[in-house]
Amino acid sequence: DTGVSQNPRHKITKRGQNVTFRCDPISEHNRLYWYRQTLGQGPEFLTYFQNEAQLEKSRLLSDRFSAERPKGSFSTLEIQRTEQGDSAMYLCASSPSTGGTEAFFGQGTRLTVV
Amino acid sequence: KQEVTQIPAALSVPEGENLVLNCSFTDSAIYNLQWFRQDPGKGLTSLLLIQSSQREQTSGRLNASLDKSSGRSTLYIAASQPGDSATYLCAGVYYGQNFVFGPGTRLSVLP
């Protein structure tokens, strides 16, 4: 197992375009998280899944953001009508089960909106 | 509101020094506390996880402690090396499995 994988690593897009990121968690990890990190700040929670169910969404996740995890495997995060304020590192993490377990993060997708 | 703070924001030390990074959290109903390392432009690497029933965890030159009553955790790095230079983040894990991160401590170890 090579850990949590995120693609693409970098994305440059024009304002107003839609972008989609993919996260492949560690095999058999049933929890998957999305975070956003801006320069000099700690990651901020966006949403998480228990298997295919999206259990919690932050108020940071506006209507332009949508996340899915079909069949409880990989996950996608889509941003519609991107804005310059969406420029950030988008991090995905997974953990094996409820309670007391360690989360493992991917290398992130760096989004730049120009 | 659950908040996590980290002191200092930045730290520069000569190689070989022992150092302590501090993390404070406002909500003592913490489930776990996890320390991470982040290199510039990279993702987060897990260092240590302390469960609420534990008081400390050790891995190599790293030792992390957790005091729920005072709302504090510390990360102790022994015999620091230039390769330890990175940003260190702590995250409180609450019952909903939502990680609340501090802003990080940026560490530079000078050769």
Image (cartoon, coloured by chain):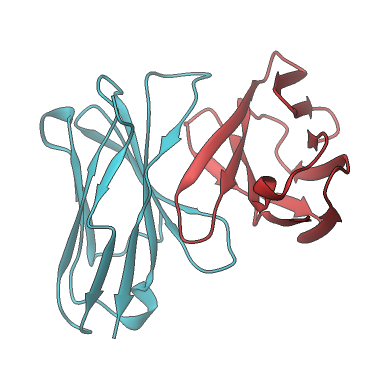
Is any atom of residue A43 visible in this view? yes
Is residue A19 toward the left or the right of residue B19 in the image? left
Work out whether residue B6 or residue B100 is closer to the camera in this orientation and state it.
B6
Name the residue rendered at 31%, 69% in the picture: A111
**Residue that appears at 17% across and 38% down:** A69
**Vertical side of B50 occupied by A110: above or below:** below
Question: At x 25% / y 69%, what residue is drawn?
Answer: A11
The red-tinted chain is B
Query: In this rendering, is residue B61 above or below A60?
Result: above
Q: Which percent across, then down, holds residue A24?
A: 23, 38
Can residue B2 be seen by looking at this rendering?
no
Left or right of residue B28, residue A34 in this image: left
Q: Nearer the viewer, residue B33 or B97?
A: B33
In the image, residue B29 sits, relative to residue B44, either above or below, namely above
Residue at the image position 18 percent from the left and 82 percent from the top: A16
Q: Position of residue A40 (x, y in %)?
A: 59, 67
According to the rendering, which colour does chain A have? cyan
* Left or right: B29 as drawn, with respect to A66: right
Q: Quadrant of residue B37?
A: top right
Residue A82: percent from the left, percent from the top?
24, 76
